Every structure is written in structure tokens, then in C-alpha cells.
Amino acid sequence: MTGLEKQMQARDTLPWPERVVRAVGAGRRLQYSLLAVLLAFGVAAFFIMLSGKNPLLAYWLMLRGAFGSADAISFALNKSTPYILAGVGVALCFRARVINIGGEGQIAVGGICTTWVALHCGAWPGPLPIVLSLVAGALGGALWSGIAALLRIWRGVNEVISTLMLNFVGLLMVGEVLNGPMGEVGAGFPQSPVVPDSAFLPIIWPGSDLHIGILMALVLCAIGAMLLWRTPFGFGLRLIGASEPAARYAGVSLARSMLLVMLLAGALAGTAGGVEVLGVQYRLIEGFSVGFGFKAVAVALLGRLDPLAVIPAGLFFGFVEAGALAMQREIGVPSSLVNVIQGLTMVFVLCSIGLDKRRKRV
Amino acid sequence: MTAMLEMHAISKRFGSVHANHAIDLTVPAGRIVALLGENGSGKSTLMKLLFGIVRPDSGTIVFKGRELAAQSPKEAIAAGIGMIHQHFMLVESMSVVDNVMLGWPAAGRWLRRTEMATRIREASVRFGLELEPEQLVRDLPFGARQRVEIIKAILRGADLLILDEPTSNLSAPEVSSLMAVMRRLKDEGRSVIFISHKLGEVMEVCDEGIVLRNGRVVSQFEVGSVTRAQLARMMVDRDLDGTSPRAERPKGDGVLEVEHLTLSDGQGRTLLKDICFTLREGEILALAGVDGNGQTELVETLAGLRSPSSGMIALAGTDITAASTKARLAAGLAYIPVDRASTSIVPAMTIEDNLAMRDYMSRPWRRGILLDRHAFREQALAYIAEFGIACTGPAVTADALSGGNQQKIVLARELGRRPRVLLAAQPTWGLDPGATRFVIDQMLALRNSGAAVLYISAELEEVLMIGDRIGVLSAGRLEGIVPRSEVDLTAIGMMMAGAARERALGNDRRDANR
Amino acid sequence: MSFTLNQAELGGFLASTVRVASPLLLAGLGGVLCESAGTFAVCIEGMMLMGAFAGAVVAYLTSSVVFGIVASMLGGACVGVLVAVCTGRFRTDHMVTGLAINILVLGLTSFLLRGMFGGQAPNIRMPPLAPWTVPLLSRIPLIGPALFKQPLLTCAAFLAVLPLQLLLRRTQLGLMLRSTGENPTAVFATGANPAAIRAWAIIAGGVFAGLGGAVLSLQELGTFTDGMTNGRGFIALAAVLIGRWLPVRTMLACLLFGATNAIGMSMQGWSLPVNSYVIQMMPYLIALGVLCCFGRSTRMPAALGTSVSTH
């Protein structure tokens, strides 16, 4: 925490609502994230110039492409949704010193489960198809993350390596399943049949593609925040993150906390996969989840592990991607610039976290 | 014969602390010199100065006739000084020979393993070190690892070896081996500085020595012309402070019973040996002892953070040997850990969160599945008022507070629950006199209200001031618990210096030599 | 189900195994260097990709394969410098930094491929490196073509294994490197600088990994395509894990993966009822299996993933 935060908190003697205090506190830390984003755009601008284009024009087009119309905004919001969902799960994990980078695989398996249930329960009444499909997705993702958690608890396997390996296995399983039982016969491309209409996520902005996923993401982030700051479980997570000896002294079961937080993160990622299937693609497509997992980590870090701050971080990623596609269309600046910006942002955020650690020691 | 080492008028300050004050130390060639003193007497600083880890503020060091101004351990090593630290700098997964060769130019760019192995075997035989070059350090017992460090120093040409508390973790036969090694070094004309607080060992192997207290030399002695008792007195001699008035209390019932508590670590070392005692209501049992003799292990085992290898712990008649930390807390066992930086307090969390840290899973802090932040706030304000924690509010982070106030948080949390038994490990560590006074008063108040306190401290003064009964922890054993009225300073000094164990050691060695 | 194998097919299968294994091996050797000194080598995917890109572009621009190879090594080294600065000076988390840099390199290579050539990726079409035939030895039935009729970089990869193993286990330099990954404090006590050793190990790892990328772009395909490493860096990581951070064993693991890949590719010819996706999963599943067995590994460099404090 910076001196500024300390001063700010010191002046606080009135019983402010906890959430506001936390949000403002997070706001101070977010200023470093903002700095990282600006630096990333700056460096990327240099690369744009190298390729002979005008960076200011490029960024303007990116902005317009992301915000320019209702269609654009709804597209960007849809893109942000899985990042926010998976990001909040990763943020909770990182809080408890569990480095879960298995978002890719968890989203993939979640997508598989969602598609399977949707294809088979399309005839059921009311909202059941959607609800059951999403629940199946959550369970699938939780199963996937649970494997890594159990490997860590029972065999001491480092969860970073296991989630990494499981990512690839999960991705390949999607291809496996689409070339077999769930594949669409006659399609030249590994994909599943379209899910029944009853499983489509409802559109919340008539006339656009904006589906209910973004609202789900917002609600789940709020629940995540409440979990972290207002429940005994969340308190335990924060203790583990602050100091393991202190957590043990306080009677927290490290193994149990780790298992639960991993299951939760897996469920959230699985839901993200389900949302992608039921809200955007309407079917399972091979490779639909590529890159999501790592971006979830980036979003969690950018939001400094705060469930509420993950929202703007995820929106940032989604809007930048949406804008980049438009930018490529209009002046031919390759959309791979997005990866450059995202990668640079992550690097700068990581460096600022590292600097913080150094200052803390002094 | 010129002395090998002459340290003259060495002084060093760290901020306001005078670690060394005008210290003179002479080490002749072919002699084993003892550096005696308690924790905080300045021994380690003096050796750090010699070895180039820190620079002296004033004074001179003359080594082998030349002035030594070592800027780094590398230079000290090159000059011929070898230091065997308490914490070894060895790579566990590698062999003895690899560890010896690490960073040693003489081993060659292309490692001359067989040559080095031969040299290790030779030195091993010559000095009685019993080391096989291909053994993995990981598989070696503690004493053998120490000998690896010694052989490293010898092979690099050390004429002066500094052994820093070398016997703390050694078994009796290993101590004998070490002493034999030291004598062999002496025979070769090399010198040894033997840093210790163990009088028996000093008397057995050293030729002469100095005693440090509070950064000054209080005595120089020849081993032949001083008795153990005299040395003990020199180390612990101090005026007893006016003790606070204490009400005489009738003997209460036993509330914490510990029987045959033994704790071993994964490497075969026994950290606690057959500890037995009963803590009674309304009394403070104060245990003295130099750090590293099992204090932390004892309180952690009693608090539930470590599992004993054997033995039993009972609280008010109920067996809690296998109970969790939470369960023990619920049964009325409070614990103040020694580590304030990261265990008893989380500096980055707010005061009210710290106050709730051990109880947030029960009412009133928790209501159903949610935390009751209102209750957090109220409890915090109550504790702040009761214990006078100086802060601007409960929502401030704990790292903004002074050490004394941080300790008040711990006290408020542990004492505020009106425990039956309190385990306090070095609760006044790092506190100024005012805060220390406060802590001690709280301990006494708790005792007067009928609770039992197990108080562990490395400060002998404090132990003597606060305990109704006083004991000593030495090498994992609980030595001699005596009531306050029967305290004999000399006896305590000897117990702290491991005299009782020495007797046992002497017996072992006699048996081994038969 | 029956299948017949004639000698030619088996020989071809072996040759294919060796060929597929070579980029993995180079990246794996880079990973061994990097991790032996204590830094998680999640970044080798990015180092490989940068090497592939630099190699292809420079070879295309200069019409010289040699310059291309040198460029690939420099490209990998540059990524290594970035990783070293972040994990060393800024003490960032190794794993997450590696991931971030992988994404950065993915975007940067694709972007520069188009950006440097006026918005359109150039049609790089270079002849893949021809195999070098060792006279006589390559006529040995079965293993002849596999071992003695391979292109330059493959030969280099396999020839580098033994020297690297000797370096690590028999020289003072290797001893210091491995000790940095086990106990940096011990290294510091000898007067050396463990932080510098780590940095150089990362950069050396980048050189190897970059070379591995050059295998893909210069030797195999003769061009650069977006994200062409396609997870090979992570397979190499799995190989390092299975090979317990030893060059020779890592090579064996890479050959194993090369074999599973070759099996998958010639699957049709053999009519085996095994799915190609499962084959592709093998490296990862095997790695997980090994991890399970060795769980709390005593072989892993003890200081892997930690930061080096300069006290």
C-alpha cells in the first residue's frame, strides 16, 4: 500500500460502508494499472510508426471501432464477458497464492459440457435448457480445475504446471469430441450442430447481439467481491495471501481453502465457456477458447486481484480487441497489435507489482 | 610468538545500539579461544566485522602480521580466515566434493573431481572428519554437514577458523568428534575462535577466552585458572530489578499437563526431549534459555501448529494432543507467537481484522454465512479502549502502528478472550521499556485473575522478574523448575549454558571410551 | 487388425521421429539451461517463435540462411533479455511473466510480419534446408537415414546434447549454474553474483530456443506463419520435466514425443484405431503422469521460481 493510501485510511474514523472504502482503496492501486496501460499504448504506438502508419489515427479508429455504434458496443461487451467471468475466478485464486492458469482448459471443458446438455435438453420447458446447460458448464470447469487442485493436495504437484498441461489436454478434447460424438455430420470443419433455440442466451438489447452474459458477469463479480470481503471463507483467502504462517495460526485449513477456491474458479471459467457457446457461437467450435485462459490471468492482474476491478479490466481487454478488428479493417494496421498491447500491459503491470514488493521490504 | 589475530578497540554501532564497544581480542597461533556471551552480547557482530560482512566504526584488525580491512567474505577467505556459520551454505542435492568445489578456482575450470576427492579424503583422515566425497549433503546428518563446511575452510587454506555456536544441534558423540577436529587443527598451528554459551564445552576444549556482555568485554580468562561456576556468574551477573509487588497466591489446580512430550524433525534431530510439567491456575511458569534450544518448538507444539512425535498434552483434564489450533483456542488456550512481523499480526490488514483474526469463524464476528462487520467494529473499539491501543481508528492498517501498539493488538486479541492458559513466546521482543512494562503488567494481571501463563523469554532478567516458578530450556530439555524463592543465579546460568547436559555428555563419553 | 511394416517404412518412421524431435530438443536444451539456474522457462514458446520469425525474415531479406540462423539466435536472446530484466530486476513472477511475453511475441511477430512489409505479409518461400548425407554411415539400414541424413540444425541439436551435459556436470561454470538454481545464497557466499548467472542462463536459453524456432521456419517449412510454434515450447517444457532437467534425458523425452507425433502422422497407413487428438495429448498426459509419480520432487532445482535477493 502506498503512503497515500495509508494517509487516506488513517483519516477514516467514520463507519463508512466497507465496500466503498475497499473500492477507493482499489482505485489507488488501479492508478498503477492505468499507468501500465498507457505505457503499453505508448510502446505499441512506436511499433505502429515502424510499420509506417499514424498511431494517433490508428488509436482513434480503434476507439471508434469499439464505441462507435450500438452494434460495436454490444460486440465489445460480449467479448469482455468471458474475460470478466474467468478473470474474477483467477483473481480469487491468486489472492490465496494459488496460481491457476488453467482457464483455457476449464473454459474448453465447460463449453463441451454446456453443448452436450444443450443438445440433449432442448425440448425441456422454460428456462431449463439454458440453466441446465450453464450449470453443466460450470460443473465441467470445476471438474477440470479440481483435478489440478487434488493433484496438488495429494501428490504435491505444482498447480501451475498441472493447470498448464491440462489446458492443452482440454483443448484437444474439444477437437476430439467434435470429430466424434458431437461433431456435425457433413460439416467440413470441426463443429457441433447448432444448439436448439431454447438454449440461446436471451438478448438484452433488442436489435443487437448483446446477450445476458454481461449481466451475469457483473452479478458474479459482485458476489465474488462479497465473498472476498464479507464471508469467513474470503477472510481466510486473504489471510493465506497475506501470510501462510498467520493463516495457520488463525486456524485456516490451507488445503481446504485451496480446493474450494480452485473449484470456484473452474466453475466460473466453465460458465464463461458455456456463455461463449450459448451466446455467441451457438455451437461448439474447435479452438473457441484459445487465448481466453491467459487473458483471464492478465485481467485478474490488471484489476489487482479485486473482483470489482476485474470488471473494468475485462472491459478494457474486450473493447481493445473489438476496436482492433475495426482498426485493421479501416487502415490496415494488423489486429495482432492487440496481443502486443495486451502482452505489454501485462508485463508493465507485473513490473509494477514487483516494484511494490521491493518497496514493501524496505 | 606473534599473535595470529589482534583485534584492537573495535567499536560498532547500529543506529542507537552499541553492538561492540572498544573490544580487544587476541588469538595466538595454535590456540583455541572462546568467545562467550548471551544473545545480544555482541558476539555475532564482532565476527561479522572480522569476516568482512560489516565494517567497524573504529579499531584495527591485524591478521598474521598484516592489517586486515576485509570488504567482503571473499577477501577474508583469501587472507586465511574461515567461518563456519550456524546456517550452512551448502547445496543439499549435491555431493560433498561438488560443494567443496563450488566457486573454488583451484578446482579448475574443468572440474578435477578425482583429485579433489583424494584431497578431501586426505584432509578427512588428517583431521578426523570422516567424510566421503561422493555422499550427498542431503543424506548427511547435521554434524556431518558442519564438517563439510569445515573441510571447505581448511582446503581453502584457512589458518583461523571461526566456529559460531557449532554445537547447538549436535548429538553428544558429534560434539566429541568436533572437539577432536579442533584439537587436530590446533596441533597443526591453526587457531580456532569458538563462539558459544556452553560452559562445559568451553572448559573442555578451549585454552583461553573472553566474556562479552552488552557489547563490552567483561572478563578475560585462561581456562586452567577459572572455574565453571565463576564463568557462569560472569555471563549472567546482573542486578535484579525491583520486582513488581505480587500477591502471593495459593497453589491452584493443574490446568495444563504436559507429559513426555517429544518432537523430532524429518531429519532425525530431536527438537524436544521428554518434556514434562504441570501448569497451575494463577501462576506464571517462566522458562529461560538461549534462542534455539526448543522454545519455539515447544509453544508451537502446545498451540497445535506442530504435531509431537510422542507424549500427551491435557487442558483441564481433556486430552488435546491431537486437537486442531481452533479447537485448542475454543478450549481456552491462547498463544502469542514470537514472530510479530508475519504470524501474530498481518501488517497489511486493518486493526479490526487483526483483532478478529483468530475468531472470525465464530460468533459474534460471524453471522450465518456472512461476516458481521458491525460486530468487527464494535469488538475492535472495545479492545482498543480496554488495552489502550494508540491509533486513529480501527480501520487503519496495522503496519502504521508502533511495535508496542502492534503487540497490544496481539495482547488484546489473546487476553481479551479471558483464556484459561496463555502461551507467551518472547512477548516483549523488540519493544521499548514502556511497552515492555505494559506487557508484563498484563501478564501479571492475567495471572492474578486465575489463569495460567507459560512465559518464554531469552531475557533472563524478565524471566526472573515475572515467574512464580522458573525453569530453563536447554537443548530441547526442560531443566530444573524451581520456585521463585529458591532461585540460584549461578545454577540457572549453568543450566542455560548446558551444564546438566554436559554432565550427561560426560557420562556418554566415559561410556563410549570404556 | 493387422499391419505390416517394411524396413523402408520403419526407417522413414525413425527419420521422422528424429526430425520432429529436433525443434523440441533445441527448445528443451534452452529450457534446461534456464531452469537449472532457477527461472521457470514458460517463456521458451515466445523465444522459439521470435527465433522462427527473425530467422525467416532475415534469411528472406539477405538471401542467406547463415544470417537467418544467427538472427534466430539473436531473436531468442532478445526475448531472454526481456525475461531476465523482468524476473531479475523487477522480481516478477516467472510463470506469469513467461505467459505475458509469449502473448507479446505472438502479437509482435504477426504484426511486424505485415507491418514491415507495407501491410501485407510477404510471400516468403524459401527452400527448406537440405539434409546432409554422411557417406557410408547413412547407408546403414533402418537407423542410417534417421541418424546420418538430417539437415544442419537437426544435427546441431543432437550434437549439442552431450557437450551441454558435460558442461553442466563437469565444469565449474555448470556447477555454479546448477547451484544458483539450488541455493543462490551458497553461490553468493563464494563471491559470485547469482542474479547475473541467472540472467545469462536465461539468455543462453533464449539462444537455444530461438534456434529451435529456426528449425521450424528455415528447416521445415521455409516460411513463417503466425503462431507457428503452436505450443511446441510447452511440449519442450514437458520434456524438460520428464527429463528431470538433464540434457540427455530431455533428448530421450523429445524423441519420445517425436515418436508419438510420427505415429499419429502415419496412423492412416497403419489403420490403428487411435484418435489423432489423443496422440497429440500424449506429451501432456505423460508429463502429468511423471509429475504424479515424482510428486514432491527431489530432483527439481530447489530454488526454481524464487527471486534472488541481493544480500
Image (cartoon, coloured by chain):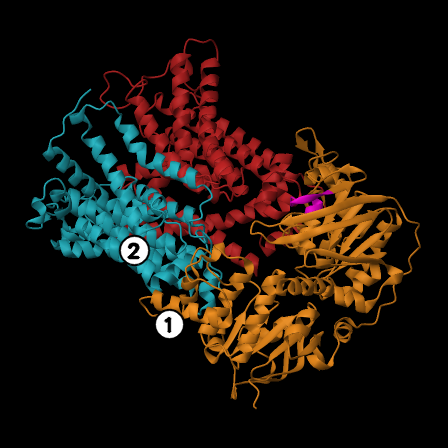
**Residue type marked 2:** Gln
* Residue drawn at x 80%, y 50% as measured from the top left: B453
**Element marked by disc 1:** helix
Q: Which chain is red?
A: A
- Which residue, given by chain and number where applicable, does mark 2 sit on? C165
Whether residue B500 is in magenta: the answer is no
Spot occupied by residue C131 in the image (x, y as percentages of width and height): 11, 47
Tell me, for residue B105, which label it has, or none.
1
Q: Is residue A67 visible?
A: no
Which of the 4 image quarters holds residue A209? top left
Q: Which chain is orange?
A: B
Which of the 4 image quarters holds residue B104? bottom left
**Residue type marked 1:** Pro
Spot occupied by residue A18 in the image (x, y as percentages of width and height): 65, 39
Spot occupied by residue C3 in the image (x, y as percentages of width and height): 16, 24
* Residue drawn at x 13%, y 55% as measured from the top left: C62
Distance between mark 2 and mark 1 Cα atoms: 21 Å
Residue found at the very far bottom of the displayed protein: B1
Q: Is residue A277 visible?
A: yes
Callout 2: residue from which chain? Answer: C
Do the dots labelled 2 and 1 sit on one chain? no
Q: Is residue C17 left or right of residue A298?
A: left
Colour in which the image shows chain C: cyan
Q: Is residue B424 left or right of residue A123?
A: right
Q: Which residues are magenta?
A: B301-312
**Vertical position of residue B52 compared to residue B263: above or below:** below
Whether residue B303 is in magenta: the answer is yes
